Image (cartoon, rainbow, N blue to C red):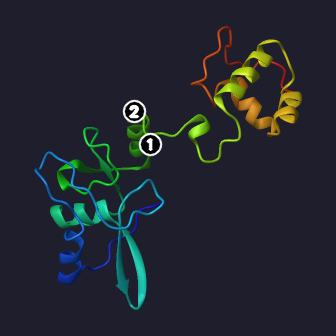
Amino acid sequence: MKPKRLPELYENDITRFWSKVVQREFDECWPWTDYNGMEGGRGRFVVTLKGAKRHLIAPRIAYFLHYGRDPFPEDVLHNAECNNPNCVNPYHLHLGNAVDNRAECVASGRQTKGSSHHAARLTEDIVYVIKLALIRGVMLRELATHYGVCIATIGNINTGKRWKHVKVPGFKPSNTRSKQ
């Protein structure tokens, strides 16, 4: 989700915001206790603007309230020590972009992969078998048909672009194996 500018917050909004936070020591996480949206568990703060409800990301508001500036157009990221998307402790927050955010997610091990990904149609065990079949020279199209996935999925396994965490002795990602 691309960051948006924060609307004007009134004193009652600010008071209501902080009432939904468990404030602890500066080096501890400050959990958001209210609504968490679907986007990675980040807290959502609801304000009404011109009669319409708007859901704002809680860490963005915490950053704004503490540092006095709207973080737009940047993303608000959590420090590696925190790594808690539900935390709104301003001392755990810093600015970055989507690339920084993705890199920090991967480095911290929060990135979903394999069968834990919401859209996964394969499991690690099946991918293991697919990689064994690729070593033996089974055609990509045949594997795709057998496992009910598109040929691009098998191609991404073949080239190591996806499912690289499934280790198979003797499997080396390649663009030279049979494409069909």
Q: Are marks 1 and 2 in contact (CB under 8 Å)?
A: no
Picture disc at residue 137: none
**Count of numbered circles on the image:** 2
Residue 74: give x, y in percent of width and height. Answer: 35, 57
Amino acid type of the residue tagged 1 in the rendering: Arg
Residue 103: give x, y in percent of width and height. Answer: 42, 38
Residue in the picture at 19% in, 55% down:
90
38 or 67, nearer to the observer: 38
Residue 68: give x, y in percent of width and height. Answer: 17, 66
Identify the image quadrant of residue 124: top right
Quickly name the residue at label 1.
Answer: 102
Quickly name the residue at label 2.
Answer: 107
Residue in the picture at 67% in, 33% down:
123
Which residue sits furthest top?
170
* Residue 52 in the figure: left or right of residue 152: left
Which residue sits furthest left?
25
Disc 1 element: helix
Mark 1 surroundings: few (<14), some (14-19) or many (≥20) residues within 10 A: few
Residue in the picture at 19% in, 69% down:
18
125 or 69, nearer to the observer: 125
In the rendered image, the vertical position of residue 177 relative to residue 8, given as above or below: above
Mark 1 or mark 2, earlier in chain: 1
In the rendered image, the vertical position of residue 94 relative to residue 161, given as above or below: below
130 or 102, nearer to the observer: 130
Identify the image quadrant of residue 160: top right
In the rendered image, the vertical position of residue 40 relative to residue 167, given as above or below: below
Mark 2 surroundings: few (<14), some (14-19) or many (≥20) residues within 10 A: few
Residue in the picture at 68% in, 13% down:
171
Amino acid type of the residue tagged 2 in the rendering: Ala
* Residue 165 in the figure: left or right of residue 1: right
Find the distance from the CA under tag 1 to the CA under tag 2.
9 Å
Residue 180: give x, y in percent of width and height. Answer: 88, 27
